[in-house]
Amino acid sequence: MALTLLRRSLAIRERALGTAHPDVAIGLYNLAEMMRFSGAMYGGESPLEMRALFLRALAIRQQTYGPESAMVADALVRLAIPRLFEEPAKKGLRLAVVGIRIGA
């Protein structure tokens, strides 16, 4: 139910604001986080879809705030978390380190 409502909310934001608006990035994150919490990392919801949502949100934030912003750092860390549970976890660690360096 929550995923359905978040998908609907994202679609409304995209129609109202356009696909590259920072508020759309928030909707993308909300949906991706709900997927993560509902088990996408462990085979529940699609981990590929979850990653694609995080990547879209990251691209919007990079475009809007610049590559060295705290918003981008947050996006990189959120993208890294699911990858820490994959093989090789090295990809997730690299993203997390970049995000932490930007945010520091």
Image: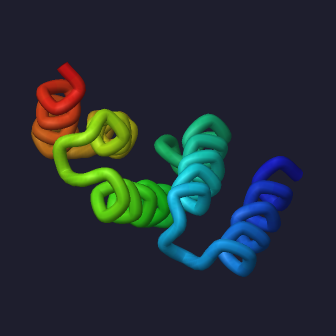
- The one of 57 and 21 positioned closer to us in this rendering: 21
Quadrant of the rendered image containing residue 13: bottom right
Q: Position of residue 14 (x, y in %)?
A: 66, 74
Q: Check the image and name the residue furthest to the top.
A: 104
On screen, residue 41 versus residue 76, left or right, reads right
Q: Is residue 104 left or right of residue 33?
A: left
Outermost residue toward the right? 1
In the image, residue 96 lies at what x, y percent? 21, 32
Image point (36%, 40%), residue name = 71
Is residue 45 among the parts visible in the rendering? no
Q: Position of residue 77 (x, y in %)?
A: 31, 35
So how many labels did they put on this image? Answer: 0
> Is residue 21 shown above or below 47?
below
Q: Nearer the viewer, residue 35 or 58?
A: 58
Residue at image position (65%, 43%) is: 34
Q: Is residue 12 left or right of residue 26?
A: right
| Image position of 82 with respect to 16: above or below | above
Q: Nearer the viewer, residue 13 or 39?
A: 13
Residue beneath the point at 26% across and 40% down = 69
Q: Quadrant of residue 55?
A: bottom left
Name the residue rendered at 83%, 48% in the picture. 2
